[in-house]
Image: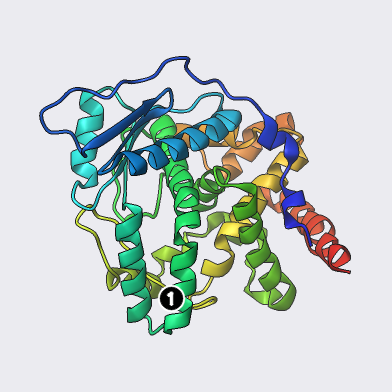
Amino acid sequence: MRISSLIPVVGLLLTGVVAASGPRCPVVEAPPAASCFASPYGLAYADTAEEAEVASRAIGEAAQRYASYFERAPVGMLLLSTQVDATQATAFAKSNDLAFALVWVPAKAMRTMTERAMRQAGVDRSRIREALARADAQEAITLRHEAGHAMYEAMFWPDAVRTLEERYGTPAPDWLDEAVAISMETPESQARHLAAFIGVAKQRRREIPGFADFLAAEHPVRSAALASALSRGPRSDSGVQMMVTSSGGFAGLETFYGQSLLTGLFLAEMSGDPKILAPISSAVAEGLDFSAWLARDGTRYNLPETVEALEPRWNEWLQQQVLRAGRNSAR
């Protein structure tokens, strides 16, 4: 089955607005890291020039994809560090007129944290080796995903302050937050999210929440069991924390990302607007929830005015365009 065919090509080919020039690496006494790479999309810092270039490429790819959905991408900073935390990075970004600061762990440190987390989870050595072999390829995807979160928050909620105890991501509904971030990933990575969702939907359909319930659901990381497991995982001094869980180990985690992406694709297809997440996000930033946006603007975008009226369309679309199409492709 070629799940990637579900991703609207038009959405991936849109051209966003990107500034012709961008920030320059500032000359300061104490930079966040030794190496800086500047581009029209922002600054990338890391301990080595090679890592800074990887970070710069990721933020650039995410920015171009982000601009294809939201017309422009906020220009910020991506820092690969195990020492500088988000508060310090944000202060540096603001002092240099950057819209956001994203701190992530360098590849080598991430491999170390991954191995430690997997050992804590009791994973056998062969699976650890397999996971570490995939780590480098996954790094760029993760950076693009996290950059999407950072750009989204900077554009719509630039002054938001939160903790995991309050909510997982931005003030947007968690499905919307993840739909945006996953849209920054590669088509192959998106296809893996869809495959995970479709696999559960076909074999354990009762585990898939209904449309209305999903729209109101919190990210599975907010569950008490998952939050507790995460708190026991390795944590860098820069604030990045990690845990490893088996497939299906926590309710909803296996399917949440795929269902978030599918919800965005569904709304784009039903409305005929591949940029539909932009007006929804603007409304949420104004203080409306998704139901209120539908009531106010649904008909303008060829959508019904209530979630109750939209849910049957979701059920039919999911069955006909996703699940049944998957069965036909597998033959």
The image shows residue 276 at horizontal and vertical percentages of: 65, 35
Instruction: Give the answer, above or below, for where 78 lies relative to 105.
Output: above
Secondary structure under tag 1 reads helix
Task: State the quadrant of the C terminus.
Answer: bottom right
Residue type at mark 1?
Ile
Name which residue lies at 46% across and 40% down.
58
The image shows residue 17 at horizontal and vertical percentages of: 55, 20
Query: Residue 293: which quarter of the image?
Result: top right
> What residue would you read off at disc 1?
128
Query: Residue 213: which quarter of the image?
Result: bottom right
The image shows residue 128 at horizontal and vertical percentages of: 43, 76
The 10 Å Cα crowd at callout 1, few under 14, some 14 to 19, many 20 or more, is: some
Name which residue lies at 49% across and 56% down.
138
Name which residue lies at 24% across and 59% down.
236
Instruction: Give the answer, above or below, for where 21 lies relative to 184.
Output: above
- Horizontal side of residue 16 vs 312, given as left or right: left
Farthest-out residue, top: 20
Task: State the quadrant of the N terminus.
Answer: bottom right
